[in-house]
């Protein structure tokens, strides 16, 4: 009887003690937060200029490059102060300014105070230098983005740990030493990056140089692994990319991006979607609206010239499968023959161990005459090219459904 009545009493005592402990912890946290606010407003804000050297040293350690701050001030207009920095420079290995910031406004919140980050960074008129060296390594504002093969970069970790970064009126200068091309200058650059514990959303709007085309937009949405320790380990991110180029001179664009093809001439509108897995591009979709394109798809092939090229191209590439498809593809060849706008789907399963390579082809409204005229300019394999030349097929095929095993260009 006594044992029965004593059990609830012990349980109540434990519960009450736990509640008092949790309440004390909560009160302690609020007192610590209140003390932090008081210290910020009464001690640090009036003397913020005295901490410039310390802030430069701390920022240099966090980002991984030397940081110079021209001026610093703080405002106490709300519960948490706002810090404003002027004439901020990030220096590269040669001591040159790789990133210049006229004005940076940093706001904090209770969350950011605890993890020593910012709730928002607002940056006006930055001048950013992006360079690819002769070895193909990318340097952004003096940071070598290929320093660590694991993606463990202090600057990237710090940047993607910030809740929100907003850039207005920026200038980006892209120098490609590997291609020995003239520097590319993007102006009126706007950029927003919003980062949570597991996700990163970004948007970039920029105006290309005169003659390149119209203002372009790039968006990205990425997820990092649940147990990822480092926010900037982009080589483990998975997500999507999107780019909208309302009008672009593809001839100029081809000088600055890696392409298997060589673009001799081309202009029009492009929209691109890309799938990213573990930091690598695994597939994509391209919507085309080009007035003319003159391109060599391989160094050994003659140029392919098409006019009024419209439609959608889709591709996918992983360790096991290659897939390519077209949708509503229409164009006119240089000889005046019109492709009718049919759909095509091609898939290849690659050989792995004892697995025999195999493929599948689906097509509708396939103009064989137009295919014969451009076959010697397509990277379809010598065996298939000889087969087309030997039989010289013609006419419009409403439907093709084929499967095979072994190399597609086997004799």
Image (cartoon, rainbow, N blue to C red):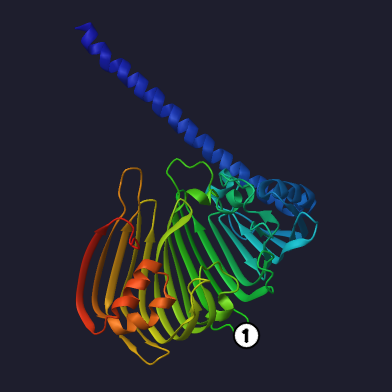
Which quarter of the figure is the C terminus placed in?
bottom left
Question: Is 121 situated above or below 27?
Answer: below
For image coordinates 36% across by 72% down, the residue present is: 386
The answer to whether residue 43 shows anywhere in this view is no
Snapshot quadrant of residue 6: top left
Q: Where the N terminus falls, by quadrant? A: top left
Residue assigned mark 1: 210
Q: Is residue 390 above or below residue 283?
A: below
User: Residue lying furthest bottom in this view?
Assistant: 336
Query: Which secondary structure lies at badge 1?
Result: loop
Name above or below for residue 363 compared with residue 41: below
- Camera-side residue of 280 and 338: 338
Q: Name which residue lies at 61% across and 42% down.
A: 35
| Nearer the observer, 140 or 124 | 140
Q: Is residue 130 above or below residue 288?
A: above
The residue located at (63%, 47%) in the rendering is: 154
Residue 331 in the image: state x and y as whole percent: 37, 85
Q: Residues within 10 Å of mark 1 (few under 14, many from 20)?
A: few
- Rendered image quadrant of residue 358: bottom left
- 331 vs 97, left or right, is left
For residue 347, side relative to residue 33 (left or right): left
Query: Where in the figure is residue 303, as x and y percent of width and height?
Result: 49, 80
Residue 117 placed where, x, y %?
59, 49
């Amino acid at each position: 009887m006594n044992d029965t009545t004593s059990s609830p009493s012990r349980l109540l005592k434990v519960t009450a003690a736990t509640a008092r402990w949790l309440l004390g912890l909560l009160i302690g946290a609020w007192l610590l937060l209140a003390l932090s606010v008081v210290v910020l407003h009464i001690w640090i804000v009036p003397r913020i200029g005295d901490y410039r050297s310390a802030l430069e040293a701390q920022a240099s350690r966090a980002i991984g490059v030397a940081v110079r701050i021209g001026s610093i001030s703080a405002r106490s207009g709300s519960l948490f102060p706002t810090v404003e920095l002027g004439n901020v420079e990030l220096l590269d290995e040669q001591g040159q300014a790789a990133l210049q910031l006229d004005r940076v406004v940093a706001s904090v919140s209770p969350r950011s105070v605890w993890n020593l980050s910012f709730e928002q960074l607002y940056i006006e008129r930055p001048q950013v230098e992006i360079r690819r060296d002769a070895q193909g390594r990318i340097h952004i504002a003096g940071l070598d983005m290929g320093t660590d093969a694991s993606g463990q970069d202090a600057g990237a970790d710090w940047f993607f740990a910030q809740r929100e970064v907003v850039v207005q009126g920026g200038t980006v200068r892209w120098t490609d030493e590997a291609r020995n091309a003239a520097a590319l200058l993007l102006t009126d650059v706007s950029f927003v990056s919003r980062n949570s514990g597991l996700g990163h959303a970004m948007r970039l709007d920029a105006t290309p140089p005169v003659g390149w085309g119209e203002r372009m937009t790039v968006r990205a949405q990425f997820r990092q692994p649940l147990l990822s320790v480092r926010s900037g380990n982009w080589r483990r991110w998975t997500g999507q990319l999107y780019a909208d180029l309302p009008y672009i001179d593809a001839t100029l664009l081809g000088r600055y991006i890696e392409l298997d093809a060589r673009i001799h001439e081309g202009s029009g509108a492009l929209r691109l979607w890309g799938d990213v897995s573990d930091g690598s591009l695994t597939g994509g979709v391209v919507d085309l609206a080009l007035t003319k394109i003159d391109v060599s798809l391989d160094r050994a092939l003659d140029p392919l010239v098409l006019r009024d090229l419209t439609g959608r191209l889709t591709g996918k590439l992983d360790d096991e499968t290659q897939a390519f498809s077209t949708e509503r593809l229409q164009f006119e060849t240089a000889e005046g023959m019109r492709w009718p706008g049919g759909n095509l789907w091609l898939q290849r399963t690659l050989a792995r161990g004892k697995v025999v390579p195999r493929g599948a082809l689906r097509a509708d409204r396939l103009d064989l005459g137009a295919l014969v005229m451009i076959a010697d300019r397509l990277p379809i394999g010598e065996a298939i090219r000889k087969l087309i030349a030997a039989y010289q097929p013609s006419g419009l095929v409403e439907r093709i459904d084929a499967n095979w095993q072994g190399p597609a260009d086997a004799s």
